[in-house]
Image (cartoon, coloured by chain):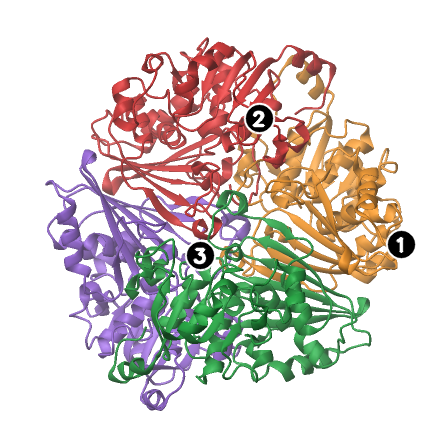
Chain colours: A orange, B green, C purple, D red
Amino acid sequence: MAAATEEQTAESVSALSTTVIGASGYTGGELLRLLSGHPNFEVAQATSREYANKTVGSVHPNLRGTGLRFSEPDDLDSVDVLFAATPHGVSMEHVDEFKESADTVVDLSADFRLETEAEYDEWYDGHVCPEYLDEAVYALPEIFREELPGAELIAAGGCNATATILGLYPLFDAGILSGSEQIVVDVKVGSSEGGASPSKASSHVERSGIVRPYAPTGHRHEAEIEAILDTSVSFTAHAVDMVRGASATSHVFPDSPVSKGDLWKAYRSCYEEEPFVRLVAGGSGVYRYPEPKAVAGTNNAEVGFELDPSNKRVVVFSAIDNLMKGSAGQAVHAANVALGFEETAGLEFQGLHPVGSP
Amino acid sequence: MAAATEEQTAESVSALSTTVIGASGYTGGELLRLLSGHPNFEVAQATSREYANKTVGSVHPNLRGTGLRFSEPDDLDSVDVLFAATPHGVSMEHVDEFKESADTVVDLSADFRLETEAEYDEWYDGHVCPEYLDEAVYALPEIFREELPGAELIAAGGCNATATILGLYPLFDAGILSGSEQIVVDVKVGSSEGGASPSKASSHVERSGIVRPYAPTGHRHEAEIEAILDTSVSFTAHAVDMVRGASATSHVFPDSPVSKGDLWKAYRSCYEEEPFVRLVAGGSGVYRYPEPKAVAGTNNAEVGFELDPSNKRVVVFSAIDNLMKGSAGQAVHAANVALGFEETAGLEFQGLHPVGSP
Amino acid sequence: MAAATEEQTAESVSALSTTVIGASGYTGGELLRLLSGHPNFEVAQATSREYANKTVGSVHPNLRGTGLRFSEPDDLDSVDVLFAATPHGVSMEHVDEFKESADTVVDLSADFRLETEAEYDEWYDGHVCPEYLDEAVYALPEIFREELPGAELIAAGGCNATATILGLYPLFDAGILSGSEQIVVDVKVGSSEGGASPSKASSHVERSGIVRPYAPTGHRHEAEIEAILDTSVSFTAHAVDMVRGASATSHVFPDSPVSKGDLWKAYRSCYEEEPFVRLVAGGSGVYRYPEPKAVAGTNNAEVGFELDPSNKRVVVFSAIDNLMKGSAGQAVHAANVALGFEETAGLEFQGLHPVGSP
Amino acid sequence: MAAATEEQTAESVSALSTTVIGASGYTGGELLRLLSGHPNFEVAQATSREYANKTVGSVHPNLRGTGLRFSEPDDLDSVDVLFAATPHGVSMEHVDEFKESADTVVDLSADFRLETEAEYDEWYDGHVCPEYLDEAVYALPEIFREELPGAELIAAGGCNATATILGLYPLFDAGILSGSEQIVVDVKVGSSEGGASPSKASSHVERSGIVRPYAPTGHRHEAEIEAILDTSVSFTAHAVDMVRGASATSHVFPDSPVSKGDLWKAYRSCYEEEPFVRLVAGGSGVYRYPEPKAVAGTNNAEVGFELDPSNKRVVVFSAIDNLMKGSAGQAVHAANVALGFEETAGLEFQGLHPVGSP
């Protein structure tokens, strides 16, 4: 990304080679963007069955200058790290192949996020290699930083799950919630969550300006949230008019009274040192609470809260870019931790103000 | 609105004369639009201090053909009906004047929505004529149809309150909720709720593409919801990228198990005969649940629900156009009922498909 | 649309029966909306091969209350008027069938807009029934009002052509332009122009927030403009972020000096009496020139201009709703004229202020 | 921006100190973002009268992590480089002060873009220090690369002018245009061009979804275009629904016939080696011509064209991010050239795909 200097040339010689599977999708494109600007990685292969032999720039216009071309996913190069950004169900069919071609595999689908076959079967349809479920490490460094170093199979979390977990985790960590309380999670997401395949519902005509319930109950990300926080949640997602972004509003009702000071303490204790989490709760200005617009294009998560004494409720807001902290950025962050690189390497972009719509 | 025919000319002679106070605002403009196409009303006066003597069309471009001009609000004509679409606090200062100039006063502000001075003081800042609080009838015909005929002071409900109340009312009416349960209401609203005064936060630059918590706790519409449903609610509102529209998602947890059949029965029983409420819950197509986009410009409310057995939760969705069913349309509907006109008179517009953003 | 009165019931008994072919598309939906609120028409049949037997409301949520269902297009009822809202090339295959089933056929495709087979072949691909080209009357009443009464085959104009023609016509009519001058037409259109079939380019993800040249040269609507105005134009279209709307900016360079007074005279002379054309050129307020946002949902065209003395240029702005004045509204207007009804019947909706995006 | 390494720490010690005047505006914020990630600059002072003593992050949420605070503009530090991002007319009042406090002054307003007092007076209102007009170098390195090294006063170009000039320049450079031809420039711009002061016309309510002519004739950027290209242009600007971005469509009519090959040759000859200009003209995929969406957040300009043989017209498309290549990015690029740094330093961000709205 930076202009070549002698030091950087030296660095790139020793950079780890990477393959991106499913590189024509939106998270695949983000991986290419991040890896091509990363001091410790270089992209060796970017696969896409649909666009094989076409330039990466013909699909991702921001990558026009990279000179990369898509290749068929059938012949994988031998690389150091492989990132798989395919639809759910594809990675588990190919995981042995992936592991053979790379020392470290980071999967961005839902295939390895849950820990047991039983959990998987409850929410998805039959796992073909459940033996890997236990091995895979969930990619969120804020919670699994200790387990990531040396991991050979990493599962990047779901975007809505990531936003929700980051919002609620400090309340569990501080004992403000124990897992038996009522938790309502109301999520608002952008259109890139639906992936790159066109449909009538995702057309500009039908999807502009909407507030559309798209998963009133039974959203699969509920499984991840419940597994990682060891609780039950009442989860509902709505599609709204943005392209990137997931915003989770969690309404929780602690059993014992809690003060604003308790809340600040809980959140600071978890996130004060985190490079990618910002506490945003009140203050002056336009951006007083977490907003997807404020983190678009970045790996940042914004987390904030408000206390509603009359209803004994804590309202927690968390906002991420679903393609970044909710997917590709989280994957690169986890890879950085797993491989001993600077945590923020390749993820320094601080976002834009203003931006039209995330 | 319709081309003049002999019958219609005859009708307009006998139409009731109306004044619209605050006619340059967004709800004022909607009132003018509705009244100028209404067979039983005719607009005698449209006041605006800021735009006095300018044409109505210079502010509301859709009304360019009407020939109306704004007048100063100081000299009120004697009319049959007066609609007041002013900011909170203005109507209570002028209500005697309003009542003197018109037989029927319909107020669109919050000044007369609550029943007692104590309630008002809890949520707002001191009422100057609390003696009218009890007299005023809340404008929602779906609940107060019996009390409206002959009413001389009518208070149109708040937009978010209207959406929420319409969603939850059947559950209370059917005894599925009693008032002691946990109720979380998560609302998404458009920018027209903020009124016509510009601010940095409401500029296109800063407000495009947002999911912005703007009333995490303590939203004043909570007062109306709680008063009318006789319950407590945990209410949070978010601003999203649309201009018109309020969408309320209410998460409720009945004490006793409830079936989908019970829910359909409850909602059908309340709304089957209602001219402006549509039950939208599932089915095929793009628009499977209530959406503001589907009701933009109309007086319709869409109400739907889903049952989440694993969490013993009912998720209720309700969507309205905040300027119509949430304000001006509700006001005209209530006036129709109060004065004995056809309920749907002037409110027949069925909306557009597609529309960019409501 | 209006509340039922005895007169209107009487009217509907004598309303003309209509068929809408291609009723699940966007212009088809608009036709259903307009005809179901029209005092002189009633919808007998609404065809859609894809959605046959489904309710009209499952596709067009604004029409949920109508009770209409789509039928297969193979068995056409015998009706008074048939509106065909199919993709280009379909109507000419079925026109004999259409004419057999209805006394008056109004076609909304491009199949009968041009006058000669040679013209058609230059811009499209071979006409199967060129014998009808001469018979068909172009639907714009502002220009062809005299030819419409009694017409049996009417061709609604293209949306971009309509906007452009309405903007330029008075300059030709007044002799300010003769046909030999340089005319540059730069058009901005919404996503509904692309129809209801999803594609990647028309997805919300890829189409939000764009200014995208989509027809740099050779746009087919150029043919209509040139034929009707008897001139040559340099035409380019851009897709922008709205759903409804076509805005044409025409830059013209009259051979002789022209004054603002000349321009006002030319435009007033053509449009002063027109029920659906508004002159908007300057003045105060936010909406000083024609804008699609100001006419969304209506059959209105806004036309305005500015004089640039230093470049000897007249800049003409014209804005319409592409689904209304640019298609379904124009079709109904033309049918009203053709059949001797009130010109504005069924087309009285005056639009919304504000509206999010047209 | 990059993770700190020993080399980079060493670099920052020797980085040039900079002041940003008017740092709370949109271009000021972009300057802070670019400079804080730039290896050769460090921000010493960020002034804002309105927000003095507040954190930069309270206005620009993307800069929350920087720790910077705004200071009053009255006491300027002595720095190496000063960037002034104030409204037109402010810089010329303070230029002596600016020059005293810094060796190099880069002004982003219109105050020093024109070469002579006469030109300035024709388009603006009286210059207070015309003696600097001749000294100032126009910031576009693609045209003035030779004049920038060592420049002490640099004037960043207007955004619309920049887009237009970059599109047309190769046609003049190759002799395809000589200056006597008809040139129509039709520009579409985002809301950030209007700056950060709220108004009714720029509110989200009134500005969403628009195609609004806002400078039908007489736009001041015309002056820059005409001065730099030595020609006359017919210029019109429209506001559309995006926040960042300027897209210029230039319709030109060369006196002699020109082929696509001639055009490619002209554009390649000028831009093949340019780090920030991309030729985008045809090809497959969604992004076939220049689009603001493809360059949002970057310093890239996309330039493309199409030939319309029937009208003897060349249509030139050019797209930039108005806050970047059209202002802050151009300023930093020019400073890089002026001071002998790597041209792309601090400007490597390659943009996002997808992004909601630029």
What's the CA distance linking mark 2 and mark 1? 44 Å
**Mark 3 or 1: the one toward you:** 1
Local crowd size for mark 2, using a 10 Å CA cut-off: few (<14), some (14–19), many (≥20): many
Q: Secondary structure at mark 3?
A: loop
Q: State which chain disc 2 sits on.
A: D
Q: Which residue is mark 3?
A: C243
Mark 1 chain: A
What percent of the width, then of the height, locates residue A163?
73, 48
Kindly indicate whether the residue at mark 1 contacts the one at mark 2 (C-beta within 8 angstroms). Answer: no
Amino acid bearing label 3? Val
Viewer-nearest residue: D343 or A126 = D343
Residue that carries the numbered disc 2 in the rendered image: D32
Residue in the image at 62% along x and 59% along y: B124
The label shown at residue A178 is: 1
Judged from the image, the secondary structure of the residue bearing numbered disc 2 is helix
Marks 3 and 1 belong to one chain: no
Picture quadrant of residue B59: bottom left
Location of residue D261 with respect to D74 vertically, above or below: below
